[in-house]
Amino acid sequence: MYSLPLYFPSGTKVDPLGVMYSIDSYHDRGDNTPIHDVDPTKQLEKDQLNLIKLLGTLNDRLDKHLSGLKKETKEVEHKKKKVIDGVHSQDKKGDRKKGGTGIPLKETLISTIPWKMVEDKVGAEEKNGISACSNPSLTKYQQEKIGRITVTVTDHDLFWIESLAKIGSKRDIKFSGEMKNGITTKGMGEVEVKKGDSFSLEVDSLCSRDRVTAWKILGLVLGLFSFNHHFALQNAHSHRWLIRLNEVISEGKKEKEVLSLVSAISQFLSRFDSLSSHTHFSLSDVLIRRLFNGNLPNNVELWAKRLDSVQ
């Protein structure tokens, strides 16, 4: 940036070229004058005054905006009142002359004031406000009369057939054979239970060796399952758990498979009250409940106790 001769006086002051900018030296200052000439206290007071001024301006703008909203609200209320009075007067004239206008008041208001929307806060399927406040219960779908059902079960199937037989005693479904539930008359249906080396279900001339299909047929008879399209979401969730349960039973109810199922159920129950995502317990809940006992995750244990209280 600059050059010096080989020999130069020791008192020579070297000033670099001002390429960008210069900075005052901190050295050789004979007084204690602050580097910055601005007093920090005065600067802070100045900033505070500017901030107060800005807040005052913002407050004035907000007051103007709110006053405008109040004025618009009054105009809308006045308009709505005129519409209602007009509809009532038309209805009175129609009642005297033609027997009514034929236009519902609610429809007239919505068409006149389009931004006014009526929203249903209750779900179309559950019709419950807060599920946590509802008492636990089993689903009660329409029970289908299919005829005499014969089920051949293995030793690994006894836990869930016992649960279904217990519910059958409350819903007038007779279980006979290897699993009885105390119902002596045929009632709404009859399920004969046999023991064998492989699983099967027979009804009339049909035979199924698939557990998931058999469970759904038994669920139709007991009112725990329905193919109605209104319950498609619950059926989709239940089908998922029926497949998982079938895999566990097919593997001989190994501890590793059972623990994996418990883990998946624990995650699902962190969002829903039952395995069908419904506030009521359905087929999948009843079938899986007796698969495991003992130490369970908190939400699974709570689910099990609520389910036990209604069986």
Image: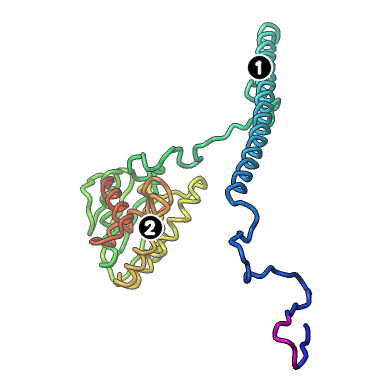
What mark, if any, has residue 81 been given in the picture? 1
- Residue 116 found in image quarter: top right
Instruction: Identify the image quadrant of the N terminus.
Output: bottom right
Residue 176 horizontal/vertical position (percent): 24, 54
Q: Quadrant of residue 115?
A: top right
- Please give the count of numbered marks on the rendered protein: 2
Q: Residue furthest bottom?
A: 6
Side (left or right) of 263 relative to 116:
left
**Disc 2 and disc 1: Cα gap in Å?**
59 Å
* Residue at x-position 61% and y-position 62%: 31
* Of labels 2 and 1, the one closer to you: 1
**Residue at image x 62%, y 71%?**
27
Residue toward you, 81 or 224 = 81
Residue 297: x %, y % from top left: 31, 59
Residue 145: in magenta span: no
Rate crowding at label 1 as few (under 14), some (14 to 19) or many (20 or more) other CA atoms within 10 Å.
few
Q: Nearer the viewer, residue 53 or 81?
A: 53
Q: Is residue 164 above or below residue 14?
A: above
Quarter residue 241 falls in: bottom left
Dot 2 and dot 1 residues touching (CB under 8 Å):
no
- Give the secondary structure at mark 1: helix
Placement of 27 over or under 311, stated as above or below: below
Q: Which residue is mark 2?
A: 215
Question: Could you tell me residue 224's position as x and y percent?
Answer: 38, 49
- Give x and y (percent) for residue 292: 27, 62
**Highlighted range, magenta:** 7-12
The disc label shown at residue 180, or none: none
Q: Amino acid at mark 1?
A: Lys
**Image height of 65 relative to 247, above or below:** above
Residue 11 lies in the magenta stretch: yes
